[in-house]
Amino acid sequence: AQKITQTQPGMFVQEKEAVTLDCTYDTSDPSYGLFWYKQPSSGEMIFLIYQGSYDQQNATEGRYSLNFQKARKSANLVISASQLGDSAMYFCAMREGYGGATNKLIFGTGTLLAVQP
Amino acid sequence: DGGITQSPKYLFRKEGQNVTLSCEQNLNHDAMYWYRQDPGQGLRLIYYSQIVNDFQKGDIAEGYSVSREKKESFPLTVTSAQKNPTAFYLCASGQGMTEAFFGQGTRLTVV
């Protein structure tokens, strides 16, 4: 069964430093996509970055990069040069398959990031 | 602008009432999803739909119902059978493998 695991309930990082948020996943489907979302206190879910299972290179979007290690089934989010506005809840998610009954989008339990000045 | 619109933003329900949460998207996405989020917790899948007139139960479908009569719309009804409906409800839509976006959410409170 597909599963997303985020083992860090909370993280602290100093402003301007880099931080890595961990995510491991479990799936038997060779085709899947991995997502990271940011949820500030307002509640909205903001899409950050996407990595496809067949993508050869790690995804990057501005200060966000995804450290994709397929053999280890990990998809860690790296935020470089942290800013105070990065303080939020971060969720890792996975969508597997190209349709059919398993085409769900499932989430981990999240990591609360606090950026300190 | 393209996006996902959820309404209302805040909703109050009396005990024993059914209420319907709206979710509309103009992204031309095939798949749509409903999630429930309780304070300090992650997202749990209620229902999802991959195509018009078809939907599947998620992990916590009991006490909820949905319909998908149009590609753009995926309303969620919280029925009186849902014993603990107070939560934050998020709707999402997606296309293929690479896109999955969320609405702003509806905060439902039972009074």
Image (spheres, coloured by chain):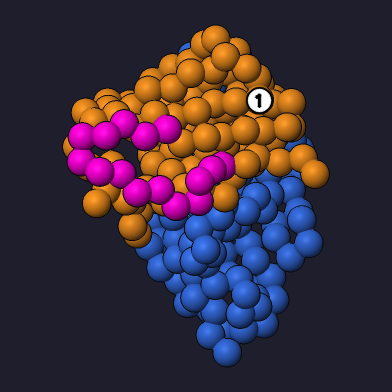
Chain colours: A blue, B orange
Name the residue: 42% across, 32% down.
B20
Please identify the quadrant where the C terminus of chain A is shown: bottom right
Taking depth in this image into account, of A45 and B76 the one nearest to the observer is B76
Q: Chain of mark 1?
A: B
Q: Which residue is mark 1?
A: B72
Across and down, in percent, residue B13 comes to: 31, 44
Relative to B42, say whether A115 is above or below.
below
Q: Is residue A15 left or right of B58 when viewed as pictured?
A: right
Taking depth in this image into account, of A75 and A48 the one nearest to the observer is A48
Inspect the image, locate mark 1, and give the three-letter code of the amino acid beneath it.
Glu
The span picked out in magenta is B6-20
Query: What crowding class fits label 1: few (fewer than 14 Cα within 10 Å), some (14-19), or many (20 or more)?
Result: many
Does the segment drawn in magenta span residue B14? yes
Name the residue: 62% across, 17% down.
B70
* Picture quadrant of residue B46: top left
Please identify the quadrant where the N terminus of chain A is shown: top left
Does the segment drawn in magenta span residue B71? no
Toward the bottom, the furthest residue is: A117
Q: Is residue B29 left or right of A113 when viewed as pictured?
A: right
Across and down, in percent, residue A115 comes to: 54, 79
In this view of the protein, can residue B36 be seen by the observer? yes
Across and down, in percent, residue B104 comes to: 57, 50
